Image (tube, rainbow, N blue to C red):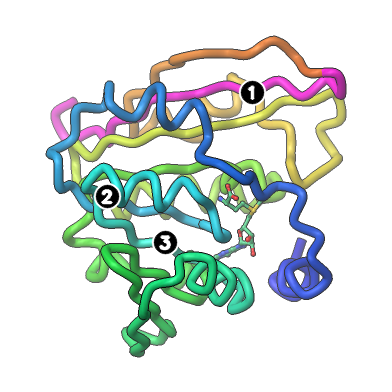
Amino acid sequence: MSATDWLERWRQGRIGFHRQAPHPALMRYWPELALDPDAKVLVPLCGKSHDMRWLAARGNPVLGIELSPLAIEQFVSEGGQPALRYRQSGFECTRQGSIELWRGDFFHFHVEQAAELAGFYDRAALIALPPATRQRYAHHLAHLLLPGTRGLLITLTHDDPERGPPFSVTPDEVDRLLSPNFEVTLCAQAEPDAEGLQESVWRLRRRGPTD
Ligand SMILES: C[S@@+](CC[C@H](N)C(=O)[O-])C[C@H]1O[C@@H](n2cnc3c(N)ncnc32)[C@H](O)[C@@H]1O
């Protein structure tokens, strides 16, 4: 899907990926990452996910990156708190409490802006991208993060590799894309649901030059 397609989806309210509550796997596995209590967390392709509020409520400041201005406006209005707006490095940014939302393309987010990030959370980001872009995403994520940075990744498989989003990303592909730059550990794999979607939860740690 192109950027225009995503913007159109938000305009039409076709956001079946959006959950009404924090993801259970986030609540279950995030504490195991044992990040510093105030570690700032990157949430690529963040939508208006409640997961960001859950992270912020735990004490982790959040930096979410999202293409759609509507997603950000809806997040802010649902939050009900005052928001501050500013521009930074070509992104339109909105801060509400300890959550910063940067409106723009994740692939334009540069390493100089990522200096404070100590964790990351990907739910429905990698699997939102078509095969060729997933490689680029994995490289970009690794490029942004310092060695030792830890995060959670939630992926899905289904029976049609061509269909998406959500795209089916197999454990082999997770390994191929991410193992060169991350230690990758499978935390959990759910049973397939009624539609054959099977969710996996991964713990990742950015490798350093000597790992
Ligand atoms: C499947 S949704 C997942 C949203 C969120 N992670 C969640 O769990 O609800 C993918 C989101 O990524 C956004 N998106 C797609 N490509 C993007 C890009 N290159 N940069 C920033 N956001 C992007 C879309 O607008 C959409 O909101």
Q: CA distance from mark 3 to mark 2?
A: 15 Å
User: Label 1 crowding class (10 Å Cα cut-off): few <14, some 14-19, many 20+?
Assistant: many
Asked whether 109 or 132 is in front, the reply is 109
Left/right placement of residue 71 relative to residue 61 reads right
Q: CA distance from mark 1 to mark 2?
A: 25 Å
Q: Which residue is mark 2?
A: 145
> Which numbered circle lies on residue 199?
1
Residue at 39% x, 78% y is 94
Q: Residue at x 79, y 25 (%)?
A: 158
Residue type indicated by callout 1:
Glu
Residue 64 badge = 3
Q: Which quarter shows the N terminus? A: bottom right
Residue 25 position, x and y percent, is 48, 26
Q: Please provide the residue range marked out in magenta.
A: 194-211
Which residue is found at the position 39% from the left and 80% from the top? 93
Dot 3 alpha-carbon crowd within 10 angstroms: few under 14, some 14 to 19, many 20 or more: many
Residue 107, position as x, y percentages in the image: 48, 66
x and y percentages locating residue 148 in the rendered image:
18, 36
